[in-house]
Amino acid sequence: MQLEDATRGSGFVPDAVFVASTILDNSMTVSDEAVRRFGAALHADGGHRLHGIVNAYLCAGWGYVLRHAMRNTALRRVALCIVDLDLHHMEWQLEHPVIGRSGFGMSTLLFELPAGAGLLPACGGPYANSAFSEFVMALRAHRLHHGVAPTFIPFVQPGLYATAQRVLSGQALAPNRYDTWGHCFGSDPWIGLIEAAAADGPGVPSRILAGAFGFNGYYTVSAVDLDAGLRTEFRHVEPHMFNSRI
């Protein structure tokens, strides 16, 4: 439904659809038959072709999807769905001792990819015990080479965010919305961007820097140029409302 709303409202017709997830149940994302059925349902609903499902890189998966599409395919118009829903109310997913409280999230992003390699997302890992540190240093390196841009990172507990502030000197770092939304997995930087766009209106910058890291040691950092007609929407669904619809 979200993909249909996004494409219909924008007039964007994707060449392919990718799904990235941290916690979507493996019964939907691993076996060939499950992925085939998932893709068939997506095609039946809106005529969209599923190019693949990526969950190996957890929250950083969207960056790996974009790098793959830019490096290895001729795709130019890509819809990327980030889906992190607690379908089975698994208590271990509700909070992590380092990352903190889970907020979950589902995002649909529409990308027009540049011809040629363009500025590929930086991806790295696995760094088993230093994923966040490597991620923040990658952000710093990107800024040194390409200049400072408004930067959107995951919503994390205050101690981790303070580390990012120190390394990046607090320059153009979007607010940490952990206290409001918790950690929403791969959707965090995009929720931050949507909130910034709603607040700034016509003042939205032309280029931003988005990044994410997975607790299994992967990270991604990507420059994104925003369309002049950027269209965004954000909906907050209370947990009891979501559960009643399952």
Image: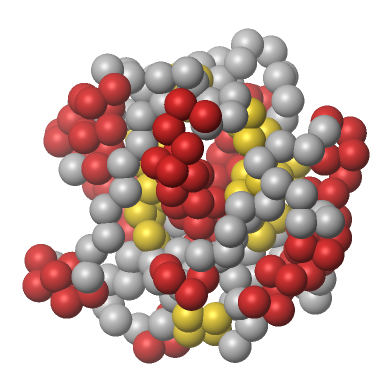
Query: Residue at (48%, 75%) from the top-left corner?
Result: 179
Against 125, residue 202 (above or below) is above
Q: Nearer the viewer, residue 179 or 17?
A: 179
**Does residue 20 appear anywhere in the picture?**
no
Quadrant for the C terminus, please: bottom left
What colour scheme governs how the chains and residues are painted in the rendered image of this protein? secondary structure
Query: Residue at (59%, 29%) from the top-left corner?
Result: 205
Spot the residue most to the top. Answer: 115
**Residue 24 picture location, percent across and down:** 38, 63
Spot the residue most to the left. Answer: 244
**Residue 161 picture location, percent across and down:** 69, 69
**Does residue 21 appear anywhere in the picture?**
yes
Against 147, residue 159 (above or below) is below
**Residue 155 picture location, percent across and down:** 56, 65
Numbered circles on residues, count = 0
Query: Residue at (90%, 39%) from the top-left corner?
Result: 144
**Residue 9 picture location, percent across and down:** 23, 26
Q: Could you say which quadrant of the image residue 10 lies in?
A: top left
Q: Could you say which quadrant of the image residue 11 lies in?
A: top left
Against 218, residue 150 (above or below) is above
Q: Is residue 134 left or right of residue 190?
A: right
Quadrant for the N terminus, please: top left
Q: Could you say which quadrant of the image residue 18 lies in?
A: top left
Query: Residue at (83%, 56%) from the top-left corner?
Result: 169
Against 155, residue 43 (above or below) is above
Q: Is residue 234 left or right of residue 109?
A: left
Q: Is residue 87 left or right of residue 145?
A: left
Q: Nearer the viewer, residue 150 or 237?
A: 150
